[in-house]
Image (cartoon, helix red, strand yellow):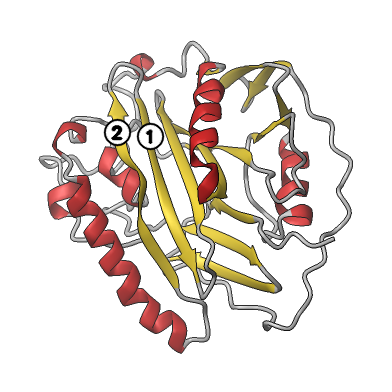
Amino acid sequence: MQRGRWLFAVMSLVAVSAWAQVPEQAGDSEEVEAPALPELHPRTGEVVLGGGLAKMVVPESFGYLSPEEAEKVLVEVWGNPPGSKTLGMVIPSDVSVDSPEGWGVVIQYDDDGHVEDEDAAGIDYADLLEEMQGNTRDENAERVKGGYGAVELVGWAATPRYDASTRKLYWAQELGFGDSKEHTLNYNVRVLGKEGVLVLNAVASMVALPQVEKDMQQVLAFTHFQPGHRYEDFDPSTGRVAAYGVAGLVAGKVAAKAGLFKGLIAVLVAGKKVIFAGLALLVVALGKLFKRGGNDGTP
């Protein structure tokens, strides 16, 4: 069995001081054989995440996989490098994770501090996209020279939007890898909390965008921060403030003070070729996007 059409990308939680890079693997002639599906035990009903950080009430149309089982899917089924730190995964009940149509929502938590959202209304997302695309193209020259696959940020599959009433940020990217004709949909949701951000990242092929958008709304409806961890629970006199705002969440969460980049590591399986590529999404001219009147991100 071959998973010739499966595409997967997962947000990495490892801060690196240089662009994340994973070398290109097999040539065009190599056969890509799907591994045996590991034993999984999807759960429904109430699920507590992160030791009480958040809670999900999962309906029968979805299933929750523990962090351990999510790791099995990411590594054994979808071919990602091991070591992803997740809070688990939500998968649809009507499709197998090892099928070409399979997809899932990877759940993570960034504890970088309270993300202030004053910049949200003034972000020019068209301008931000151009800067991100330019930096990706510039970085590709060095990536190719070093023997790594090229990455293209094709554009917004869904323009970023921030709902200030629910403290939720939505956007989707269309990504291209190497010479593959099929592009990857990376649908992102960030839920702002007291001193961190709940990360929900769904990936599928571009044709699945309408279904993924619909299903992600359901996932958001049954996922919430627990009391004591909500955005409104933040105490500015004692709490930690993140070194980035809403624009930083979209652009890749560059912490200007520390110079840290948290990038997207992507795995593409297309036809008979496997390409591992680290998505170099930017260090843009962040002054106008992230400068916030002397706030250096410390309490």
Dot 1 lies on which element? strand
Q: Residues within 10 Å of mark 2 (few under 14, many from 20)?
A: some
Q: How crowded is mark 1: few (under 14 residues within 10 Å), some or many (20 or more)?
A: some
Q: Is residue 135 above or below residue 168?
A: below
> Is residue 115 shown left or right of residue 71?
left
Q: Where is residue 192 in the image (x, y as percent from the top left)?
A: 39, 27
Q: Verify CB contact (< 8 Å) between mark 1 and mark 2.
A: yes
- Can residue 156 be seen at all in this image of the molecule? yes
> Is residue 165 shown left or right of residue 105?
left
Q: Nearer the viewer, residue 130 or 87?
A: 130
Residue at image point 56% right, 46% down? 203
* Amino acid type, label 2: Arg
Q: Where is residue 190 in the image (x, y as percent from the top left)?
A: 42, 34
* Amino acid type, label 1: Tyr
Picture disc at residue 170: 1
Mark 1 to mark 2: distance in Å?
5 Å
